[in-house]
């Protein structure tokens, strides 16, 4: 059934004349071919269905904030919420305004400030922060080859002034323990991770499977932690368009300015879409449309 | 099973020494006995389970915003979204700041500004706005006796300066067609509706039942509209604590400063809780705790 | 000397092709001929110099906020500062944002919210608020014929939704004692006062003369109060363009959306200009230019 | 006359039990003895009058923003206003909120963001930025020994996270050309300049003397530039308390968190005060009081 639905979605969307714009503040991202489009859905039992450029790697960008938070949540449990909140921001993804008004406490772990705070925590908690974080991502991806793109990483490192502003503002409120460039370095590597939609949908199966790795059965997060992380994705996963996404799609998920979106139906499947053209809020235009069609055509959302 | 769980919840919560504060900006609400506590859950098949003061009527306040929006959504379908958005506000429930920055367009129908815009639409669309709106509420409640409390209504009408500020600001942006006092009058009557938790949970069954009235099978909202309204409740139903509620409870719902909360599990049940003491964000302290225990003890949330 | 300078200013400015826009949110103001231009300067000794349409009456609008504040300051002395502050707003003249963040306390008496608070105080303090206020304005203008324009007043009363939003917001913070429509009525009449530039410059002589009425020698405000009111005009008299005005002109003054500006050089003169086309901040384009030329050509400002 | 007035001011103020707090975010500043108090007034003819600790050097902090801007204004004339505005900020001195909303353009040269932009300009314009800037300060101070305090400089460099946030935010908007740490280094050295009140009042004579160095007669700024800089000091020199200062004192000036204030009466005198205890807005409590008494007792302000 899923393959048929994905085929229909591809037919309806692929040819659309799309009004979006590629991310250009990270020069490397602006070089990706704008016509790329891929959808991949993986069921809990491991069966997968795909259409489009499913074997192209793309830059996950903010989607990886979910992975870093997963590891931090696993390590600190509820203590992680001394470092980040759980409320939607209602403001653009890199806004300093709210962060200043709220004394440097990030609203949630899925905005830039929140992910920087999470990286700071990981540096504190891990023996080899970079190696340990990437090993963790490879483990939940069940894929030893996952890594970050050197050019994207360098590009972000050179141009990441807004993220530097965020972390220095948090540091001025005493909320960052480690050297700011060290934290930023981990953050930029994390943001530069690449996967295909196939790999990404497999990695998100964990969250559809109540915290258990589908293959090995290992419990990465508890059932309750997973429920809560899914709730955070639902309310905070799409910058200041979380309401729109919840309204149109009705699944928890996370988007990135590389044009990817990963989402999941608890107990059913994980799905990843990719198309580089973004709407003004920073979410993939075709990706949003594809997921909306998916829940419309299946007749299922969590609501 | 549900009765047993509700009994446990009652035992754990009822005796708690609770830090909340009653709403006092509406003088009538401050007179309610602070120790009141009730929970009522109704399954789709109509079977109900309750504990505590389940036969006491209380002031629904903002919970009724869901009913007014249901009627407007039914009448205008997607055109209602020319009048209100679907994004969480990230600001306190009666903030003018966001409304000014966004040129008088309310973020969503479940904040005060949004409900005022919805009332303005209803006055335009209905022959006898007050009668038709209350008839509609009685219909979805399947209860001919539902009405508003005269004293609460008068109390709100006399003291509602903040709501007057909101509606005049919207009017200055050309977003209110009708006379402001006429719109406010309907809004204050709507806010003053009273129900018991039993009646309230029965009224919310509609949203758990994909838009169909459980008794008669009448389709009040389409399946897709219901999904979308549930999504709006999930991201916008709890003032600037929607993230926290989604995180801890994981069900769509709506709270009111009378101390009530209504929530639902699509395809399963609707539940109403009531306890007048509020946390600083305006949500019932014991009500939140009760719903958190409910999804923890049943092991089910939508995530 | 002054007449020669005014003639030069007129020659340089009158023919300019001017980019401004007339105020249109008050329909009556939009009907004024956009080419009108007048400057009138009165020395402390009463000698006057003028160019242009010096016998045309125009709507003083916000300039009259100075008169209402003068009376309230005279009546309450420093206690008036329990009702309004003395800081520039840094925001557009009718912004609700700052007012909400600062709990309904207006930043200063020369923005709309501040003048509304002053009108509320005057209603409390005066036996016949409207008569007494207009008698006071006539007294300091030394002109028994000063009154307000009925059409402008009606126009403001009908369309003043933003001012209604402001006063209801202040009332919700407990900062307005009297009935809101009663306060607004006085405020709209005050705003609708008309004068010629000749009359206006004579009325402002008081502030150049250390608080003494030039003709009679009556002390309306003390020397210290006058100094302080001049200081408030300097920092707050030009909406969010007070810095620009201070920078370019260097005199205390007050502008109105009718296109008028009154300013003064303490111990020297008062000057009034009028030209209806406004810049985006709501100040008269030619008026600003004329005053800049005046202090450039005389070589005198207070700095 | 001035000596007598200063003596009276000293008697009235020195013994006051003062509620202020020393700046503690720069650890070196917290070490200064809180009881220090000094006032020094210099007439245009060079005659000086002082009371209190007039030979103690103290950290000028933000007062030096005036010197850096003077040099940049001299070098670029009105082109400097492509880099900084002339409006008061209405927000605390280091707020990022306004800077973000206004796309990284600082409101004026006397707030932190503005001075950072000025330092960036100076680095572009000068052959040896640090040497040239300090030579310029020594020249207008007519004092070859002026320099910065190494410990204060190191202290600021280590703890200046908020300033780093500001400059990275401006850089993200493309408003900073040079390496951020290079700009910050100049900025921190500038902020760490020390003078006595005697030296400081002599340095400010320039601004009371229409831009001419009192000793040599050299024109540092034109008469018109000086008038404009004085106007900027009047509206922007006291963080978000510029209105209060203008209201109570009525002279242009600039304060610093080291507890110093410099002010001037055009054509008359320059005055410097110092006392380390600050009010919540960051201005010296006794310093403000002393200047208020000065203009009250002399009966002169610019208004």
Image (spheres, coloured by chain):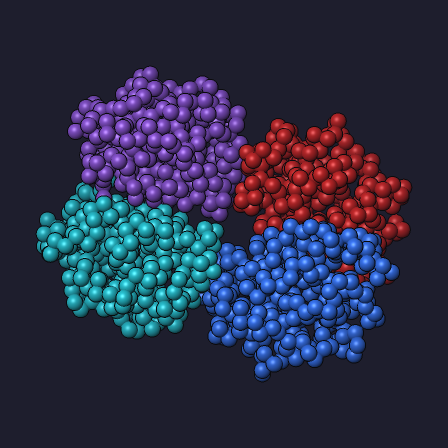
Chain colours: A blue, B red, C purple, D cyan
Residue C286 to residue D238: above or below: above
Residue B5 x/y as whole percent: 81, 61
User: Quadrant location of residue D129?
Assistant: bottom left
User: Quadrant location of residue D161?
Assistant: bottom left
Residue D135 to residue C30: above or below: below
Q: Nearer the viewer, residue B243 or B152?
A: B243
Residue C242 x/y as whole percent: 35, 41
Residue D183 to residue C222: above or below: below
Q: Nearer the viewer, residue A214 or B153?
A: A214
Residue C248 x/y as whole percent: 29, 41
Residue visible at 37% across and 44% down? C88
Q: From the image, which quarter does the N terminus of chain A lie in?
A: bottom right
Residue visible at 36% across and 56% down? D114
Q: From the image, which quarter does the C terminus of chain A lie in?
A: bottom right
Q: Is residue B145 left or right of residue D22?
A: right
Residue positioned most to the top: C145
């Amino acid at each position: 059934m899923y393959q048929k639905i994905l085929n229909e979605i591809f037919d309806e969307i692929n040819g659309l004349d799309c009004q979006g714009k590629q991310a250009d503040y990270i020069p490397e991202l602006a070089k990706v071919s704008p016509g790329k489009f891929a959808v991949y859905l993986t069921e809990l039992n491991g069966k997968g269905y795909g259409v489009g450029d499913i074997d192209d790697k793309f830059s996950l960008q903010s989607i990886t904030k979910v992975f870093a938070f997963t590891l931090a949540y696993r390590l600190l449990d509820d203590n992680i919420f001394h470092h980040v909140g759980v409320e939607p921001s209602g403001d653009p993804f890199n806004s300093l305004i709210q962060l200043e008004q709220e004394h440097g406490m990030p609203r949630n772990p899925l905005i830039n400030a929140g992910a920087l705070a999470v990286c700071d925590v990981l540096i504190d908690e891990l023996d080899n922060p970079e190696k340990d974080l990437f090993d963790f991502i490879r483990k939940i991806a069940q894929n030893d080859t996952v890594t970050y793109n050197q050019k994207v990483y360098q590009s972000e490192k050179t141009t990441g002034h807004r993220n530097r502003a965020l972390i220095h503002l948090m540091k001025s409120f005493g909320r960052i323990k480690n050297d700011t460039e060290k934290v930023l370095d981990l953050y930029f590597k994390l943001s530069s991770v690449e996967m295909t939609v196939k790999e990404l949908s497999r990695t998100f199966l964990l969250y559809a499977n109540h915290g258990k790795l589908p293959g090995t059965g290992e419990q990465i997060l508890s059932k309750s932690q997973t429920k809560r992380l899914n709730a955070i994705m639902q309310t905070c996963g799409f910058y200041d368009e979380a309401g729109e996404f919840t309204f149109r799609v009705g699944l928890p998920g996370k988007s990135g300015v590389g044009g990817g979106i990963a989402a999941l139906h608890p107990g059913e499947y994980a799905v990843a879409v990719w198309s580089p053209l973004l709407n003004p809020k920073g979410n993939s235009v075709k990706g949003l449309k594809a997921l909306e069609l998916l829940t419309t055509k299946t007749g299922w959302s969590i609501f």
